[in-house]
Image (cartoon, helix red, strand yellow):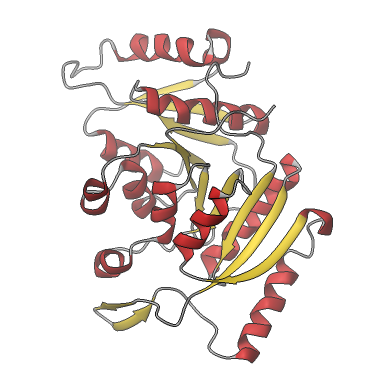
Amino acid sequence: MPSKLPCPCFPPKRIFVPMDYSKPAYSALRVAMTLARRWGSTLDVIFIELRPTQLTAIGPYGMSAYAPIPSNEGEISRERKRLRKAVAGFPRTRTEVRTISGWPSEEIARIVARGSADMIVMGTHGYSGIARALLGSVAEAVMRNAKVPVLAVREGSPNRRPLRIMVPCNLTPYANQGLAYAAAVADDLRAQLSVLYVPPKGDPHGDFATPTLRNHLDAVIGSKRARSIKVEIRQGHPRSAIIEVARKGEYDLLVLSAHRRGFWVNTFAGSSVERTLRHAELPNLSVPETPPARRR
């Protein structure tokens, strides 16, 4: 049964895969190809060459560049051949590989703003400490601003369709968008969908948690669809509960709603999406708070 809420265009007709020739980027490319085959999507694979004025992080081991960058024309040529070889198994009529120059988060934002992508699949390095403080994670910046779902993939993520999907829900309107999209993905992939709910402090034992959540699921996605959803109730801080569940290894995909908050809050505190991205190893699908209309 389809969700009662409008959600981003699903299945996505065009999947955008930004590349930097790193291992996480190639893991993301393999996952994107698997999903694109399932959904019949077109792949738009773009290598974004950093401008010469790139930032450099100063960490405990000296200076380190934001991402591996080919240092000469010969290396650039070899990397381009490697990239084209990686997509060789995907239908050519549904593949576009190109190179552009600029700052990654800005160029990705421009491409998405033009409406040329329904989903972004990208690698994440999971930076932490001073490197993240100076540079930030490009994946975090994209998730914070993108108006389409963003799937962040770490190095070594399994190249298979997810069979166990987890989506946290705090009963708010913005969280319902993630719930609706997670339900659509789970239905299409025939995956088991589980919902994580952390009761408010007024219900310390969770006595009313299960019926409250079940009623909410019925209202958002319909009672017939809601009956097949597994419910997991956790105590404590919601963000900590999400990270703990994500680290258990029981799920293949975590779906989160990207709640748009103020710049300073996002920069210094970090949203649940961004903090989970830094600490959880499994693929993280961020659904925008205000998604575009569903494709007809």
Tell me where residue 174 appears, x and y as whole percent.
39, 28
Residue at 50% in and 48% down? 283
Residue at 78% in and 53% down? 94
Give 48 or 242, whichever is nearer the viewer: 48
Tell me where residue 62 appears, x and y as whole percent.
28, 84
Give the answer, above or below, for where 96 lies relative to 241. below
Give 225 or 6, whichever is nearer the viewer: 6
Give the total of numbered labels: 0
Left or right of 221 on screen, residue 55: left
Q: Is residue 177 visible?
A: yes
Q: Is residue 35 visible?
A: no
Give the answer, above or below, for where 83 lies relative to 206. below
Residue at 29% in and 26% down? 198
Quarter-of-image position of residue 44: bottom right
Tell me where residue 216 appears, x and y as whole percent.
40, 13
Seen from this angle, which residue lies furthest front?
114
Tell me where residue 195 appears, x and y as whole percent.
43, 26
Q: Quadrant of the N terminus?
A: top right
Residue at 72% in and 78% down? 81
Give 262 or 178, whichever is nearer the viewer: 262
Give the answer, above or below, for where 98 lies relative to 198. below
Q: Quadrant of the C terminus?
A: top right
Left or right of 111 on screen, residue 60: left
